[in-house]
Amino acid sequence: MFKTLKNDIDVVLEQDPAARTRIEVVMNYSGLHAIWFHRFSHWLWKKKLYFIARFFSQIGRFLTGIEIHPGARIGQRLFIDHGMGVVIGETCEIGDNVTIYQGVTLGGTGKEKGKRHPTVEDNVLIASGAKVLGSMTIGKNSRIGAGSVVLKEVPPNSTVVGIPGRVVVQDGVKVEHQLDHSNLPDPISDKFRELEEELFRLKEEIKELRSDKVNK
């Protein structure tokens, strides 16, 4: 237990350059507080003390603005940065060394029973405002761009952007855990660029045809 608590603190110091000391992290980081509330409420949940577990999880939600269902399973070294508005559903499973930014939802798509929330494997980064909905797996070492809506499986070592989320595979090269929010591939913008180039080409062809007709 103490090793887990130490890991929770250490990952904040490693990931957030604004974090200076352990005491500062323990006292001031709502993401860390939310994780600790969850670890206790999850322990109660496993003991089948469901009402008390939900009660403590709601206290954590009220104090931190982060909602983690006590049934969710969370691995080691989860980092929730600026976590206001984060929602993690009951059957969600999160691996080790995962980073989640504010406004992220790991939710379901309806009233289905059983496993209805995502499984997030190790070393995944999910950027601000992303929505990952349904029972699917986000593969290891992947990253989800800000504002993306993910509705289907994501292979390992992938980047997902857009609505709905589209996977951009980077030549099989392992994706680094860092995410440059200002430099993400945008498949929608790329498609518009292709259409613009095609339109320009067609205009040039029309000009040539008109010129040939005038000359004749």
Image (spheres, rainbow, N blue to C red):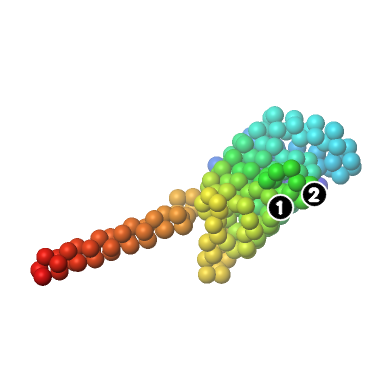
* SS assignment at label 1: loop
- Callout 2 touching callout 1 (CB < 8 Å): yes
Which residue is disc 2 drawn over? Answer: 114
Along the viewing direction, whichever of 171 and 206 lies nearer the viewer:
206
For residue 123, which quarter of the picture? bottom right
Measuring from the top left, give residue 28's x and y in whole percent. Answer: 64, 34
Which residue is disc 1 drawn over? Answer: 135
Observer able to see residue 70: yes
Along the viewing direction, whichever of 182 and 12 lies nearer the viewer:
182
Which residue is at the far left?
Answer: 215
Is residue 186 found left or right of 11 in the rendered image? left
Residue type for callout 1? Ser
Is residue 107 found left or right of 52 in the rendered image? left
Measuring from the top left, give residue 190's x and y in whole percent. Answer: 41, 58
* SS assignment at label 2: loop
Q: Residue at x 61, y 36 (%)?
A: 84
Q: Quadrant of the C terminus?
A: bottom left
How many numbered marks appear? 2
Q: Residue at x 52, y 66 (%)?
A: 170
Q: Crowding at label 2, few (<14), some or many (≥20) Cα neighbours within 10 Å?
A: few
CA separation, marks 2 and 1? 9 Å
Residue type for callout 2? Gly
Measuring from the top left, give residue 104's x and y in whole percent. Answer: 61, 43
Measuring from the top left, give residue 159's x and y in whole percent. Answer: 55, 58
